[in-house]
Image (tube, helix red, strand yellow):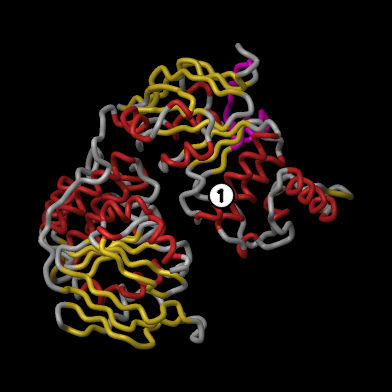
Amino acid sequence: MSDDFILEIDNVTKEFPGVVALKDVSFNVKRGEIHGICGENGAGKSTLMKILSGVYTHDTYTGKILLNGEEIKFERGAIRQAIETGISIVYQELALNPFATVGANIFLGREPTRFGDVINWNRLYSRTREILKTYGLDIPFAETVGNLGVGKQQMVEIAKALSEDAKVLILDEPTSALNEFEVDTLHSILRTLKEKGVTCLYISHKLEEFFQITDTVTIFRDGQHVDTVPTQDTNTDKLIAMMVGREMTERFPARSVEIGESVLSVKDYRVASTEHVDKMLIENVSFDLRRGEILGIAGLMGSGRTELVTSLFGELGKKVSGTITLKGKELEIRSARDAMNNRIGLVPEDRKSLGLILEQSILKNIALPNMNKFSSFMRIDKNKELHESRKFAQSLRIKAPNLLVPVNKLSGGNQQKVVISKWLMTQPDVLILDDPTRGIDVGAKYEIYKLMNELVEQGVSIIMISSELEEVLGMSDRIMVMCAGRSTGILPVSEATQEKIMSLATNAA
């Protein structure tokens, strides 16, 4: 045991029926460092974090875990035990009460009391202010959490962990829903925590973030520890090679498609909020989408990208003026059913709440929008449903023992393939992909990129929103940039650069 190490993982193995999730994993984490954890979906990252945070008890795995030189053995109901030991985790899906205040969330279940069982609100808010000030967290302590943005809510989760004197803070995909400013704020907070001696384990699929914030990176592949290296001694290509077990000579697969005539034309399109009719969500947007083209849409968070495509799909706002023309026919799209009837599909930004029924099987999720293909006279043809769904699942290489597996048991990349499968079965002419690779690993991203290329080669036209400029530049034929609900420019990819896109995204052009 070195005094430099706060956490030591020694030959940890964890098995599930038929699956070895972790195999003889050993590495150390230095005290007071920001330690990155990377690997493809299914590599074992989440399993290890669940062991460290007490979700899995010590009798369910072999090997040892030492915190400050002492072996930790979490028992039943061990999440509270892990927190009391000094290990806290902030999950990608935040677990907060949106109707309670910041202070009430931070001390939920541990409220200071007086006269036995009366909450001492003065003391609660006083302690809340102390914690926020100590760690430089800019959050209004008495604000209702539901009124805060995602970035601020994440700070509340961090404050909650720090209020319990966390020595090791685990952050699972902390920036997946944050805009650029919020990411910078989070990284600033982590540097402050580091100065105060808090050790952070930082899990992310955004490889560039490791070089912005971490001191050390540990790489997992197929349940095994590949290497632990100082961040300054590696680069993106080396990380990818260690994650996938091979050199990836290209991040974005090449394609050669002859782009055809205009398929979708949107002219002077204006959309108002249904709740506040005087509030415009989209202002005078015009663009054309051509056969076999990938039109990228870039812009900062809140620029109107998602609002635009969701309204085109008939699921947001009220069209005030403008036209939508598909293959020369002017459309009025008032619902998702109207869009589907006109062979438009949408893979939404939030696949878990908007794209999938998590408890249902792969089969039911793929088949659901396509029931008209399998049903007649109040009867569903189960054999046809299975045959057609299996065909798309195999085509997209969804990794699962069978189609009856619930989608909540799949990795993020395979969940995304299920969403795409169900829309491909509708045989769309226009497929809208809203941040299609958000929260999935580099290997799964590459598979989705190849699928997109195959679709446009078949004549499908794609609109792709992405929060990653590198992805927009790597996959688009043209790029439309949005700011404050407006289109500020459309660039051929041959003329586009990150600087030009950011200039248009901030309306500085």
**Quarter of the image with the N terminus in it:** top right
Residue at (28%, 75%) from the top-left corner? 287
Q: Give the left or right position of residue 212, taking residue 446 as reference.
A: right
Residue at (49%, 25%) from the top-left corner? 230
Quarter assignment of residue 14: top left
- Tell how many labels: 1
Comparing 478 with 88, the one in front is 478
- Vertical side of 307 occupied by 365: above or below: above
Q: What x and y, as percent, mark residue 474?
A: 28, 51
Q: What x and y, as percent, mark residue 157?
A: 62, 47
Range drawn in magenta? 69-88
Residue linked to disc 1:
184
Residue type, label 1? Asp
Is 382 part of what is drawn in magenta?
Answer: no
Comparing 90 with 138, the one in front is 138
- Vertical side of 30 occupied by 160: above or below: below
Q: Give the left or right position of residue 147, taking residue 445 as reference.
A: right
Q: What x and y, as percent, mark residue 191?
A: 63, 39
